[in-house]
Amino acid sequence: MKIGIVCYPTFGGSGVLATELGMALSAKGHEVHFITYQQPVRLNFHPNIYYHEVTVPTYPLFDFPPYETALTSTMVNVINNHHLDLLHVHYAIPHASAAYFARQILRKAGKDIPYITTLHGTDITLVGKDQTYAPVVTFSINESDAITAVSNNLREETFSHFKIEKEIVVIPNFVDTDRFQHSNKEHFKKMLAPNGERILAHVSNFRKVKRAEDVVKMFEKVHAQMPSKLLMIGDGPERQNIEEYCRTLTQCNDIRFLGKQEQVDEILSITDLFILPSQYESFGLSALEAMACGVPVISTNAGGLPEINVQGVTGYMSNVGDVDDMAEKALHILSSDDTLKTFKTAAIKHAEKYSRQRIIPLYEQLYDNVLANYRAEVS
Ligand code: GMT
């Protein structure tokens, strides 16, 4: 099959998932065409992978360069030049409306290809439901030939915020367990925690919704009881405020801000506990990747997190903002090597349910169904 994938090429979860999906499909023999404004961060070379850059020519009149128009035209050109079978767009804004427009342009020229929209989270729960975008988002989701959501929670949120007239299929996020697995990095661990301190980590884009300051607040409480280190991975709007706050703390020397990291699997391999205190998370891909590396998770119980973090098994969940409870539960997990090992083993086992091998066939099946229905309708 020839598949066009449209996504944000950055470190965000939707772009990571779309890139991992494209790479997994290419390894299974599909021809995958990424259409993005920049090379996706996790994209590796494979003979079946093509990358088409969306460039947006500027003009003095354009206070806002028309990205969506450039994206739509690039989609049309790629579909025509490479004879794609379908488009799979990740994150509704503006990818679903651009796909709709591309499909209409092609129809006029006697060519018909379906588009599938995968909803990831903030495209629905934060940005999408804003009235500035909602009419276009609702229309272009409804016009999709298939709609998927990454969790049951996101599916329900979509139905509650938008007038959706079609079924939304839940296909959960997945993890590449060949890459995200525990590997021995003892030398690396010794450098960061020379006295055997427990290592806690947080990975995010440091947007407000992540509540990354709660990681530091709960760490202050853990650190007061147990020698420990905190790794803050990623970058984003709240990072500077949180770094400034950290500098006021006595624990400052035990907190490291590592910025954006490509080899996050290696860092997770030396981590004892992953912290995700988000206000909302449609799924929490970073938590799944941590689990696959054998790292238990302390998260909130918001959004789709209860669908992946099993209370008392793969970690614990607390109410949003309850840093006392998070610290108490963290201390329990870290209290002894045996307890930690039990949680680590359970985290790996649970993550296997979301392995690439299990989830990719669900997408392939969806593509087959969409194409079969589409061809039946067209003929
Ligand atoms: O979490 C973010 O801010 C990034 C965002 C994105 O769209 O790139 O992530 C969303 O999609 C991920 C992949 O499906 C999910 O695992 C994240 O939970 C989701 N984020 C939110 O819902 C806040």
Image (cartoon, rainbow, N blue to C red):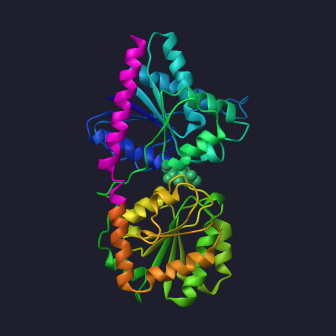
Residue 345 shown left or right of residue 155 in the figure: left
Queried whether the magenta region covers residue 355, the answer comes back as yes
Please give the name of the residue rendered at 41% of the width and 60% of the height, measured from the top-left corner.
289
Residue 190 shown left or right of residue 98 in the figure: left
The image quadrant of residue 340 is bottom left
Residue 241: % across, % down: 68, 68
Check the image and report above or below for 280 versus 338: above
Q: Quadrant of the C terminus?
A: top left
Please give the name of the residue rendered at 45% of the width and 50% of the height, measured from the top-left corner.
41
Residue 131: % across, % down: 73, 37
Residue 351: % across, % down: 36, 60
Number of on-image labels: 0
Please give the name of the residue rendered at 52% of the width and 78% of the height, measured from the top-left corner.
329
Residue 154 shown left or right of residue 5 in the figure: right
Residue 218: % across, % down: 59, 77
Q: Of 211 and 314, which appears nearest the observer?
A: 314
The range drawn in magenta is: 351-379
Q: Quadrant of the N terminus?
A: top left
Prevailing secondary structure of the magenta residues? helix
**Residue 11, can we see it?**
no
Please give the name of the residue rendered at 33% of the width and 71% of the height, measured from the top-left corner.
345
